[in-house]
Amino acid sequence: MPNNYRRIPHFIQAKLNNFQQENVQVSIVKRISERDFDSQGFRNFNFRIENNNLNYLDNFIPEATNGTYSKRNINGFKITHRDQEKIYKTWYAGERPIYGDWTKGSFSLYIRKLAYPSTTIPPKELSINLEILNDELLNNERYFTVRVYVDECLNRNDENFLIDLLCNINLLQENFREVDVHETNLTREEYLRTLVVDWDFFPPGTREGDIQRILNRRPNANRNYINTLGDRYDVMMSLNPQNIISGKSGMRNYFGVQYAENLVAFENLQYGNAIYILFENWRELSTLSRTELLKRPEDQFFRIEHKFGWQTLFARTIRGKRTN
């Protein structure tokens, strides 16, 4: 496992000092041949040459086992402040049946006890993307010049710029063993638009039609992605939602449903680590960036990991919130 950077590398800081633009992206530019297709990091793009054409996946989300920052990227993490005094905290423990009988309805169970203060850092679920810059034949061997980048545009004027920059540097370092940073050509207005969550709402139709409509935004989806989408669709639709939600643009890996005005469930199908249920202020939440979306107070959403029995917990939670 590669060593992580504890601070911004000197060569990156030197480049930043000479940049003219505000917006930057953690990325590397490399020339690779077919021999490199299965090398560190690049194997995730699933390169293959068919009929002399290069086919590949244009992005992937790193596995949690690749390193600390890869794990944080998909699971988030918590900072416990043990230097501070304990305070009373309340946790949502799910829905419980009234008198042990679900037919009588349910209630929300909250547990309150003393604990150290903590700060929850939500998962960013950033992907690593690929762009082909050049395709050439040299000495009877085909070479591709590619740009590999973390799918987040950073603005040097933002308060958390250095923190986000270090996280993205380490994310790329863990997966490709090298890092760099480049200016982007985005204007300030274009940069802000990349942060806006954009959804497509449509009423349920046929299973095949709904799934195909979602897949239209993912033309290169593999069989595993399609099967996962079908499984999650069946679970969500069994609870009779009002609308289906499909992410646009940078949110194209997100899929979900709306059960009531302030009851929405969604997840990132590319990784599919957990499903999120949002309780309140859906209209406000829908305008936030994907990284800001999960920084809301814990009483506004509930996260269910896809472990054994998650379908039952999900159904009980939705039914319980619908009756509240």
Image (cartoon, grey):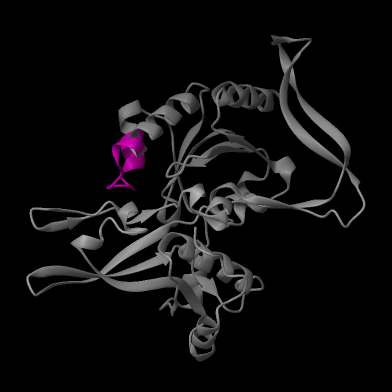
Q: Nearer the viewer, residue 105 or 203?
A: 105
Point out the image quarter for the C terminus.
top right
Residue at x-position 8% and y-position 75%: 139
The image quadrant that residue 260 belongs to is top right
Q: Is residue 51 left or right of residue 315?
A: left
Residue 173: percent from left, percent from top: 47, 65
Residue at x-position 48% and y-position 25%: 235
User: Is the residue 74 above or below the residue 161 in the image?
Assistant: above
The reply to whether residue 317 is in sight is yes
User: Is the residue 275 above or below the residue 133 in the image?
Assistant: above
Q: Nearer the viewer, residue 266 or 181?
A: 181
The image quadrant that residue 175 belongs to is bottom left
Residue 98: percent from left, percent from top: 77, 13
The image quadrant that residue 158 belongs to is bottom right
**Numbered-mark total:** 0
Residue 217: percent from left, percent from top: 34, 48
Residue 104: percent from left, percent from top: 72, 10
User: Is the residue 74 above or below the residue 261 in the image?
Assistant: below
Q: Nearer the viewer, residue 48 or 130?
A: 48
Residue at x-position 73% and y-position 48%: 297
Residues rendered magenta in the picture: 210-224
Q: Nearer the viewer, residue 147 or 189?
A: 147
User: Is the residue 50 above or below the residue 240 in the image?
Assistant: below
Q: Is residue 27 left or right of residue 3?
A: left
Q: Is 213 a magenta residue?
A: yes
Q: Is residue 217 left or right of residue 19?
A: left
Q: Is 4 a magenta residue?
A: no
Residue at x-position 48% and y-position 61%: 174
The reply to whether residue 290 is in sight is no
